[in-house]
Image: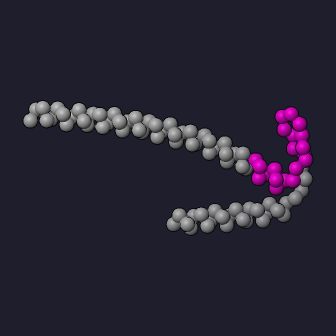
Amino acid sequence: MKILKIVLVLILFVIALALGAQNQEIVNFNYLLAQGEFHLSTLLGLVFLVAFLFAWAIFGSMLFTQKLANRKLSRQLKKLQGDGTELTKAKG
């Protein structure tokens, strides 16, 4: 199933490249400090890549904080379970 997903993503990537290669119109792009002329396909690809990396960084940091919280709670649970077994051994 994982291989099927990878193949599907690769096929979509190749289709996107083929469509992007057909769109070679030059556009004027104004950014904060200057402006430049870029091929539309290059500009769209660059914006997509920057947005993907930005989203990956945000969700990666969220995942990292959740894993840390999960690890902390797991340690607390083990500590509480360890205390509970000691209490039952002392009573018995």
The mark total stands at: 0
Magenta stretch in the rendered image: 28-47
Dividing the picture into quadrants, the one containing residue 83 is top left
Across and down, in percent, residue 73 comes to 38, 36
Dividing the picture into quadrants, the one containing residue 87 is top left
Across and down, in percent, residue 46 comes to 77, 49
The C terminus, quarter of image: top left
In this view, the residue in front, 71 or 41, is 71
Across and down, in percent, residue 31 comes to 84, 38
Magenta run includes residue 32: yes
Across and down, in percent, residue 60 comes to 57, 43
Q: Is residue 66 left or right of residue 21?
A: left
Q: Is residue 76 above or below residue 45?
A: above
Magenta run includes residue 33: yes
In this view, the residue in front, 86 or 73, is 86
Q: Is residue 60 left or right of residue 52?
A: left
Instruction: Name the residue at 67% across, 45% down.
Output: 53
Q: Is residue 62 left or right of residue 22?
A: left
Dividing the picture into quadrants, the one containing residue 11 is bottom right
Q: Residue furthest left?
A: 92
Q: How is the image coloured?
A: one colour
Instruction: Name the residue at 59% across, 63% down.
Output: 6
Instruction: Name the residue at 78% across, 65% down.
Output: 18
